Image: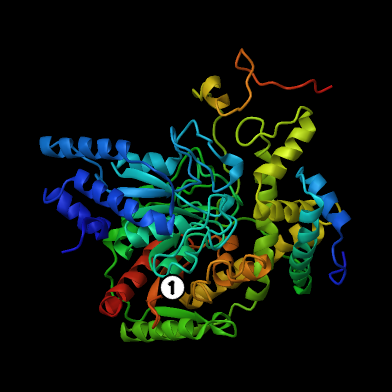
Amino acid sequence: MNPKDKITIEEVKKIAQLAHINVDDMEAEKYAKQIGDILAYVEKLKEVDTEGYEFKSQTDLINVFREDIPEPSLEQKEVVKNRQKKSKGGSLVIKSVL
Amino acid sequence: MKRLYELTVKEALELLESKEITARELVQSCLDRIEEMEPTIHAFLLIIKEEALKAADQIDMKRTKGEPLGKLAGIPYSLKDVYSTKGYTTTAGSKMLEGYIAPYNATVVEKLAKEDAILIGKTNCDPFGFGSSTENSAYGVTRNPLDTDRVPGGSSGGSGAAVAYGGGLFSIGEDTGGSIRCPAAFCGIVGLKPTYGRVSRYGSIAYASSYDTVGPMTKDIYDNALILSVIAGKDTRDATTSAEKVKPYHQALDLSLKGRKVGVVKEYLGDGVDEEVKKAINQAIEVYKSLGCEIVEVSLPYTEYAIAAYYVIGISEASSNLARMDGIRFGHEANVDDWKDKIIKTRGEGFGPEEKRRVMVGTYALSTGYADKYYHKAQQVRAILKDDILKAFKKVDILLTPTMPVLPPKIGENTDDPLKMWLMDAFTVTINPVGVPALALPAGNTKDGLSVGMQLIGPHFKEDTLYNFAYLYEKSIKDTLN
């Protein structure tokens, strides 16, 4: 996107679709301007010569490994208790996927 | 004589140990104070009364019997509402998690419980940490106790306000891009963003995983150092935690600063910095000179690009972290049958405007065709920022900057202009991408009774150096505050 171009309502709707967020027309209009401003602002990163730079990590830690030892974990009941709609057996209700 | 809720952790521990006060009296004093202040301030999303008093009674009983007690026995504290607490709601300040009760405790909660600290409430915040004023919270704005027309800062604004007015003796905030330091500055308290990996984030609801840090918010430097010594350390449940030794941070505060070097970042005192803020920072520079420090001008030339890099990476990670907010296992659930529509509608209803904005921009920055232009470019700039700051630490021991360039805005002043609000964080957000520690503390007061915050930045894992510099500053200006 060229920073001089305003981001369109259609583009906002496309991004919203990618992000799985329901956005109505009024919201989309507001976000078009705000997201446009933000993208125009971050365009300035382009000015930096980053040739040869790669970010590796914040501290000296890079990959951290451990032995894969099974340990007791939360009960299924505990894990799903925040689910709002439950079937009788306590399992999740998923309408046919395929 | 101070009222009990006005005590520091150190003072309260001394009075508890000498049995001049009981934990019940202390907890009750804070609960009464909360009841008095909440109708105006609204720092808390959950107040824990009965269980807190019960815990206090148990500690008092143990003390009477002479049984061993933890290092923070009987000290009431609050938690930003992003920390998972078994049995209590954790909303992250978002409607998406209204009523959510985590099935386990965050590591920081476990560590504080082990030392017998008493949780008395959970504090308001911008949703998922998205904001610098607490105005984005789905549960209403928190007001600044120093001036109730103004914001307390954010995103840990509830924690900042609670500590400032005595709703608990300390709080645990969360800092992804200034979320501890900004409210510390605006509310006139002390807040630490520790080194990345210093404190476990297990059980903390994620914003941007390569930035998120857990830190104490306290009334003074000693308390802050004491709390860090309790909550820091390696945790097998957070692979990013470091095995670096945890020091008794509160025990080496008084070392002489003679000959030490304080870097003043010239880019951080330029246009756009409020005159009262500049005045306070210049006063701090004089104090360090009088303590025998050498003042060195330092340049961080890439600061201009740091905010852009911070946001691109931060919201990219946020858009990925928040993908789990789909209404399937927990959180808000839209009343729709089709599974895909259900997820889209759940997120449309559950997320507020700031969550939608950040998730959408983050999604865009990671999408096909744009990831190189935005996300990867920002990561390269991040490498330069790290280089920049590590070079500075070859010349100086710490960097001194304002915490915020401005005084706390009036409530509602910036809500229609998210970009302006983002730019307010110029001096704080630049620290998280490089992972170094930064401590915010009061530099001085304005003529209208607001507080100006200053920020001390140190090399990775040098929290002890920050506390040393901060403690001696605090001691030097103690009489001029209040």
Question: A63 or B305, which lies in front?
Answer: B305
Q: Let me know if residue B293 appears in the view.
A: no
Question: B254 or B112, which lies in front?
Answer: B112
Q: Is residue A78 above or below residue B308?
A: above
Question: Measured from the top left, where is residue B45 in percent x and y?
Answer: 46, 47
Count the numbered circles shown: 1
Asked which secondary structure carries label 1, the reply is strand
- Relative to residue B474, is residue A18 drawn left or right? right
Residue B353 quadrant? bottom right
Question: B325 or A62, which lies in front?
Answer: B325
Q: Quadrant of the N terminus of chain A?
A: bottom right
Q: Residue furthest front?
A: B39
Q: Residue at x 60, y 56 (%)?
A: B130
Question: Measured from the top left, where is residue B91 in percent x and y?
Answer: 53, 43
Question: Measured from the top left, where is residue B135 in percent x and y?
Answer: 56, 59
Q: Is residue B282 above or below residue B15?
A: below
Callout 1: chain:
B
Bin the neighbour count of mark 1 within 10 Å (Cα to Cα): few under 14, some 14-19, many 20 and up. Answer: many
- Relative to residue B20, is residue B382 drawn left or right? right
Residue B126 quadrant? bottom right
The kind of residue on which mark 1 rests is: Gly
- Relative to residue B154, is residue B248 drawn left or right? left
Q: Let me know if residue B257 appears in the view.
A: yes
Q: Which residue is mark 1?
A: B453
Question: Measured from the top left, where is residue A36 in percent x and y?
Answer: 79, 65
Q: Residue at x 60, y 66 (%)?
A: B386
Q: Quadrant of the C terminus of chain A?
A: top right
Q: Is residue B227 above or below residue B453?
A: above
